[in-house]
Image (cartoon, rainbow, N blue to C red):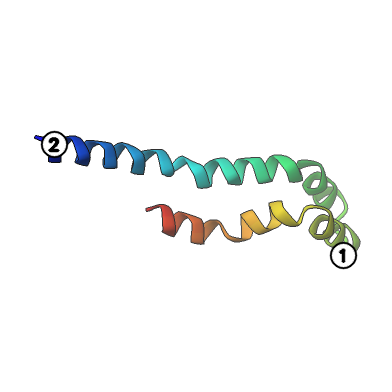
Amino acid sequence: MNDSVGDDRQGRSSRRVLWIPLLLAVLALWDLREELQLLLDHPTITALIFLLRSHPLAVAVLALQPSLWKRCR
């Protein structure tokens, strides 16, 4: 009987982890929203470099999304 309780807890914890990469991606996009609008309005190398330099964590989170999804599955 204790084995089924452990399996249930493991199932619930694995379901909870799936939303973490999604939350990180949404927060990264939220952080980049103004720079992305600027980049879409005026696509220049300067705007792209400014985006990369001013928000390195958000860019890294978006770049590593495929790896995060593989680890959480």
The extreme right residue here reads: 46
Name the residue at 90% across, 62% down: 46
Within-10-Å neighbours for mark 1: few <14, some 14–19, many 20+: few
- Where does the N terminus fall, quadrant-wise? top left
Q: Is residue 56 left or right of residue 62?
A: right
Q: Is residue 23 left or right of residue 38?
A: left
The extreme left residue here reads: 1
Residue 53, above or below 14: below
Q: Amino acid at mark 1?
A: Ile
Q: Position of residue 3 (x, y in %)?
A: 13, 41
Within-10-Å neighbours for mark 2: few <14, some 14–19, many 20+: few
Q: Quadrant of residue 7?
A: top left
Name the residue at 84% across, 54% down: 54
Name the residue that disc number 1 marks. 45
Name the residue at 58% across, 60% down: 64
SS assignment at label 2: helix
Name the residue at 82% across, 52% down: 39
Q: Position of residue 65 (x, y in %)?
A: 55, 56
Q: Is residue 16 left or right of residue 60?
A: left
Q: Quadrant of residue 26?
A: top right
Name the residue that disc number 2 marks. 2
Q: Quadrant of residue 5?
A: top left
Q: CA distance from mark 1 to mark 2?
A: 59 Å
Q: Amino acid at mark 2?
A: Asn
Which tag is nearer the camera, tag 1 or tag 2? 2
SS assignment at label 1: helix
Q: Position of residue 14 (x, y in %)?
A: 35, 44
